[in-house]
Image: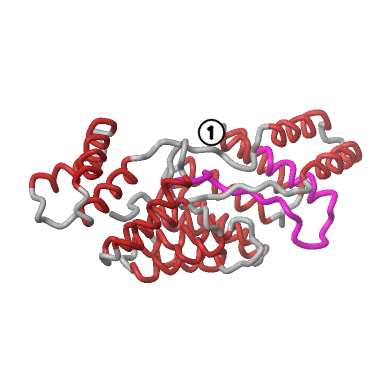
Amino acid sequence: MTFKNPCQFKYQTFISQTAQQSSVNAMSIAKKRGVNVILLVSALSALLFSGCQSTTTTDLTGGTPYQTSTRPSDNRNLDQQEIARVRTLLAAQYIRKNELDTAQRQLEKAFTADSRYAPAYDMMGVLLQQEGSRLNLEKADQFFKKAITLDKDFDQSHNNYGVYLSQMKRYKEAAAQFEIAGAALGYEGRIGALENLGRTYLQLNDHPAAAKAFLRALDGNRNSVIAHIELVDLLLEQQRVQQAQRLYDETLMLVQGQGINPRLLLQGIKLAAAQNNIATRQQLAQQLLSAYPLSDEAKQLKTWLNNPEAPWK
């Protein structure tokens, strides 16, 4: 079984390590320029203390909804750039809360402060994509392209544009964007980009390339749950059962305490069946049918139970 829902591709959110200093700078800048200091600084403080570096999820194969970086990229007017940075941070928080109109107003103010601030264009693309109407999805493409044009080394934009292209089913283009982000050593979101690259190759039915991408993700972070889960399925397809079992055992260790989702249960059933471990197979099958009776995995299991000689689909 392979990944099917492109909406689960990972946007990634990272706040600059200098964000607290940015709030101090923004306050002095705002005083000079007549901006409402209390609003800007208190709002940024709320961002910093609300854990906006990532958004937790109980979906073991999912990830953070999107990614924000606010680093400066050149020597343009740093005063204006700091204001644009603060506005973009605020917009990211409003997007998480699905307050899209408020987020859009913050980004417009970011553009006014610095019309060449790439992260603001990237974030506007994310906002328009999240809104999801046909017109806004069309507009989002141009904002992602603008961010990349303004800063070709802004790796986050390559990842987020890849997520957008995946949603639009433009998988070959998406793979090219994920490859750029996944090859950027030092980029905080590199592992997520490689996970996205692997998933994109699955959509293109290029399983060898997908396996290579997931292995690269594991090389960078042995704790990548996504890479573990996807590689287990790919190894099972190749009937490399012992290798799949080792990765599966590692996966269970990684998700310990988080509960086990239907996909992991089905993988365990497949592994038990391949090794003729009847007791484990029955135990996991009962757990899957009891806990997730309406899941796609439960439907696959029922189909297989009715015809054990048929291959898994």
Q: Is residue 214 above or below residue 39?
A: below
Question: In front: 272, or 82?
Answer: 272
Where residue 297 sits in the image (x, y, percent)?
Answer: 25, 43
Q: Residue at x 74, y 42 (%)?
A: 86
> Is 86 situated above or below 160?
above
Which residue shows up at 61% across the image and 39% down it? Answer: 104
Q: Secondary structure at mark 1?
A: loop
Nearer to me, 17 or 267:
267
Viewer can see residue 141: yes
The residue lying at 83 percent from left, 62 percent from top is: 75
Crowdedness near tag 1: few (<14), some (14–19) or many (≥20) residues, C-alpha within 10 Å? some
| Residue 94 covered by magenta stretch | no
Q: Which coloring applies here? A: secondary structure
Q: Quadrant of the C terminus?
A: bottom left
Tell me the amino acid under the disc marked 1. Answer: Asn
Q: Nearer the viewer, residue 1 or 30?
A: 1
**In the rendered view, would you say 55 is above or below 190?**
above
Q: Which residues are magenta?
A: 61-90
> What residue did someone put label 1 on?
98
Whether 79 is among the magenta residues is: yes
Q: Position of residue 44 (x, y in %)?
A: 74, 35
Residue 182 drawn at (x, y percent): 55, 65
- Horizontal side of residue 116 vs 4, given as left or right: right
Image coordinates of residue 274 in percent, x first then y, are 22, 56
Q: Quadrant of the N terminus?
A: bottom left
Asked whether residue 313 is in view, the answer is no
Report the number of discs: 1
